[in-house]
Amino acid sequence: MTTSGATVTQGCRPDRGAHQLSTVCLPNASVISRTGWSLKYTDSQETAAENGVATNVFDGNISTIWHTKYTGGNAPMPHEIQINLGASYSVSGIRYLPRQDGGSGAANGRIGQYEVYASTDGVNWGTAVATGTFANNASQKEVRFTAKSGQYLRLRALSEVNGNPWTTAAEIYALN
């Protein structure tokens, strides 16, 4: 497919305007079932002022969120969550849904710069399979990368879109 003179892989949406920057595009990637997922690790979660536990990212409810600690002081960046997918998969991407509530704090914790890792044992992570910067909006973000076999997924938030020390997420999905 060609849009404005730029070639876009058939079945894939452009990853930057009308230009396909990435050569990794998996148009038929499916969402890995979250049945059996568990939290392996998070560096921080808010449990005093709200139910901001990390397991909210795979509870199927977009109204609940993982929020890093802010009561009694902020945990410093970067923040991360490690998820045990319950079995080994060929992981080729993630979807990150920022918090969906409205109001003055709706953008709090939106991930800016990020790194994604996949691991077979949850100990040896190697180099990031994807890095980048998410747009500052509430829409779902999708990151694709060359498939890597693994049972564990790690999302590291290196920054927050407005320079704050928090990280939040409504839902995280893994793609194969």
Image (cartoon, rainbow, N blue to C red):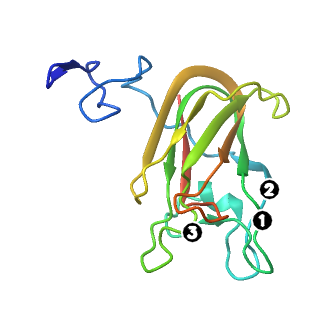
Q: Dot 3 corresponds to which residue?
A: 64
Q: Which residue is mark 2?
A: 43
Pointer 1 or 3: first along the chain: 3
Q: Quadrant of the N terminus?
A: top left
Q: Is residue 70 above or below residue 1?
A: below
Which quarter of the figure has residue 25? top left
Q: Secondary structure at mark 1?
A: loop
User: Distance between the Cα atoms at labels 2 and 1?
Assistant: 8 Å
At a point 69% along the width and 46% down the height, the residue shown is 37
Asked if labels 1 and 2 touch by Cβ distance under 8 angstroms, the answer is yes
Residue type at mark 3 is Thr
Residue 4: x and y, percent? Answer: 14, 25
- Viewer-nearest of discs 1 and 3: 1
Identify the residue under disc 1. Answer: 75
Instruction: From the top left corner, tell me how far across and down residue 132 is, in percent.
Output: 53, 38
Residue at the far left in the pictured view:
4
Residue type beneath disc 2? Asp
Q: Dot 3 lies on which element? A: loop
Mark 3 and mark 2: Cα distance apart in space: 19 Å
* Alpha carbons under labels 1 and 3: distance apart: 20 Å
Helix, strand or loop under label 2: loop
Q: Residue at x 55, y 69 (%)?
A: 108
Q: Going from the N terminus, do you reach mark 2 or mark 1 first?
A: 2
Outermost residue, right direction? 123
Question: Callout 3 environment at 10 Å: few (<14), some (14 to 19), or many (20+)?
Answer: many
Q: Residue at 21% across / 20% down in the picture?
A: 6
Residue at 54% over, 55% down? 171
**How busy is the neighbourhood of tag 2: few (under 14 within 10 Å), some, or many (20 plus)?**
some
Q: Residues within 10 Å of mark 1 (few under 14, many from 20)?
A: some
Q: Position of residue 43 (x, y in %)?
A: 80, 56
**Is label 3 or label 2 in front?**
2
